Structure formats: structure tokens, C-alpha cells
Image: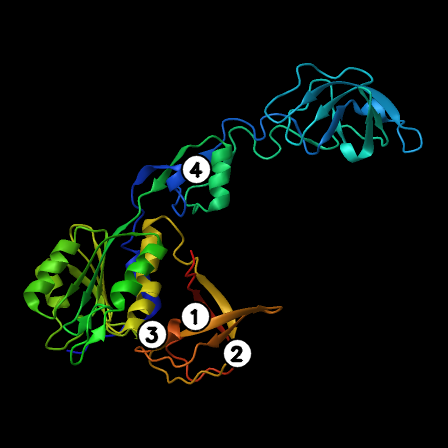
Amino acid sequence: MVAKLIEIDEAKHLVLERASPLPAEQVSLRDALGRVLAADAAAFDPVPGFDNSAMDGFAVRAADTAAASAEAPVGLSVVGESRAGRPAQRGVGPREAILISTGAMVPEGADAVVRVEDTRSRDGRVDVAVAVGAGRNVRRAGEDIQPDEAVLTRGTPLGPPELGVLASIGKAGVECVRRPRAFVLATGDELYEPDEPLGPGGVRNSNAYTVPALVERAGAEVVGTETVPDKPRPTRAAIERALSADVVVICGGVSVGEHDHVRSALAELGAEEVFWGVALRPGKPTWFGTHPGGALVFGLPGNPVSAMVTFLLLARPAIEAQLGLSPNRQRATAILDDEYAKRPGRAHAVRCRLELRDDGWHARTTGEQGSHVLTSMLGADALAMIPTESGTVSAGTKVEIELLRWGE
């Protein structure tokens, strides 16, 4: 029986219907890079916590400098010093100044800071050569963050700026969505490790390296990888071990050949097939289903590019949904600079390089687009999604793109 192919958008919809955010866990701030907040983070105290100086200079009363100029500087008595972490021991009175460092607490009585460049010190006094208004060069308490303000919201990915803000509000640990646990299987009698001598008909097992790396980049944790021969019992046993994970990714063995045993093994283990066969090039023989134990199971084609493309379009959004992220955050548009030859019947995911110009993103193909040409992924920034019904696409056409974001 020939499987009815479904559109890639419908396939993604069916996947996301079954992908829910995972429970929260407490994570040390030092281990939280790349994690996703599970709850809003609010400040208890203002940031900064006190009025402080934006400059090295002198804390003064603005009124005392009102008549100051380069021709007629105002002389003030220096009565102390305020350093970062070491506030002045007294306040500022009339006709007085306190030497102050950047970030140091503004002493009581002072309402402005004169830059050191606008002064001249002599014998315990300072000559001020400019008039400064109240508030000049002073950072007010709470100017950055107010008490009880939610500075980061649930679902925010934590990068370096977010970690800095969390540290600034006193968070040594945060509630993050638990990372999905993923198990990756590569199937095939022909597969050899990179350092093994190739036998007749053998190929290097690139899927065992690209797909776990994609899992990690998507935000999940790889809890196991195995390479499985094209035999029913080992295939079933390996899948059974993998089903304890949140996400199972199987490369190869999902087609209809005599030595493709993945679908039958999944059926024996109680997995429910949601779809098999997507109107997509590359990636037609893609399987997706769920297991009663909770695992989302992706049966991807064995061709290396097909495996990467279908992971990016289906498994990555599922992992992002489990993390509480928007599953459409990688979508954008670009202008296709090359004519792309195509016949209607299947959507095409075209590997492209991007260039940002005045009128937006421009996309140019990486070259030969065969599903066996793994080097077509080198230098690719996005997949240009050419719809099923489209024929040849002219240069200058605006197309949807799926950003790859290898570095995240």
C-alpha cells in the first residue's frame, strides 16, 4: 500500500499537538546558559540599589556650582572620599565636595557629580570650572530595575545578558524547564565508524554525529546513542531501550525495503503511528509517532541530508515546544537570488546561504541539492521552503526560510 503523503506544515502541526512543556527544575545560575525560564523572574530590591556616580570626580551640591565657569571657578573644601564598595563616612555640606569614583555611592547631601576633568585640586580644596545641574552624572537607585518588577518572563532562553540580569537581582539559581532527554539510533549494516576500515559497500556513519549534535543545539540532552544492524531483534531491542527517553530519533530503516525493520518494531512495542510519508524533498519517508510511555518518536530517512532536514523541520520544533519556546521562532523570509528548477508535487527544502541587504535577507543555494550530498549543508544558514504546488521559482521571488542557527 502506498502511503498518502502529508504536507510538511501539517506534519509539523501534528507533531506540535503532541509536544508539551516539560516540568521545571532548579538550576544553578552558573549552569543555566542556554536553558529556558520556567517562571517569571522578579527583583526584590532596586538595581542599582543606591544613587551612584557615573563618573570619576567630585560629589557636590549643584547649587554650590551655579556660578562656576572656566574663567571664575568655584572653590570647595574636599572633606572625604567615596569609593566603590567603600562609601564616604560623612555627607556633603555647603561649599563642600567629596572625591568619588565611578560606581561609588553618592554621599548624603550631594545631588550631582562634577567630572574630574572639569576640576583642579589643590591643598585639600577643589576648583570647579563648570556649573552642574541637580542629578548630573548620578545614576539613581532603581534606574535599571524597580522592586517587584518582572525583568524576565517565563519561556525566555537564557543567554549571557539574561544571566547577568539574574545575577544583578540576586538569583543564584532559577527555575528552568527540564531539558528533554533524547536517544539517537542509526540503523544500517553498511555503517562504519570514522576510524574503521571500510568494508565492501560500507559508508561512514555521519548520522551518528550530525543528529546528536542537532539534538544538543536544539536544547535537549543526548542520553544515549547506538548503531543498529538491519536485523529485527537488535532493532527492536535498541528501540525498546531508547523509549525511556522523552524524544527518540531513529535514522534509517523506516522505508518499505526487506531490511527496514523500524516501523514493525515500533508497532510491536506499542508505538502509535501518527504519520508516515511527507510531501518533502529531501525527507519523504519520514515517520512520526508516540509511545504510551510518553516518548515522541521520529523515524528519519537514512540519507544524511534528509536526516538533518527532517530533524530541523520536525524534531527541533518539538524539542523547542517541550522547552516552552515558540516553535516558529526560526521562521523568516528571504529573496531567492537564484532561479530554482522544480516540478509541482512535493515541497523542497533548499539549503541556502544568507546575505543581509538594504531590502532584507537574500538567499543563494549552496550548490548541488541531492539528499546524499552532505557538503550541501556546509555554509548553509537556512532552508528555503519552496511549496508543494510551486514549479520553477524565478530569481527575485520572496520565499519562507527556516533559519539553521548552528551556533546557538
Residue 318 at x, y percent in the picture: 31, 56
Q: Residue at x 41, y 61 (%)?
A: 406
- Quadrant of residue 307 within the rendered picture: bottom left
- Quadrant of residue 263 within the rendered picture: bottom left
Residue 184 at x, y percent in the picture: 22, 59
**Tags 2 and 3 touching, CB below 8 Å:** no
Q: Helix, strand or loop at disc 2?
A: loop
Above or below residue 161? Residue 67 is above
Above or below residue 232? Residue 83 is above
Residue 30 at x, y percent in the picture: 40, 39
Q: Identity of the amino acid at label 2?
A: Asp
Q: Identity of the amino acid at label 3?
A: Leu
**Tags 4 and 1 touching, CB below 8 Å:** no
Within 10 angstroms of label 1, few (less than 14), some, or many (20 or more) residues?
A: many
Q: Which mark is residue 374?
A: 3
Residue position for label 2: 337
Within 10 angstroms of label 2, few (less than 14), some, or many (20 or more) residues?
A: some
Q: Identity of the amino acid at label 4?
A: Asp
Relative depth, front residue between 211 and 45: 211
Within 10 angstroms of label 3, few (less than 14), some, or many (20 or more) residues?
A: some
Query: Gap between marks 2 and 3, in whole Å?
Result: 22 Å
Q: Which mark is residue 380?
A: 1
Residue position for label 4: 40
- What color scheme is it? rainbow
**Tags 4 and 2 touching, CB below 8 Å:** no
Q: Nearer the viewer, mark 4 or mark 1?
A: 1
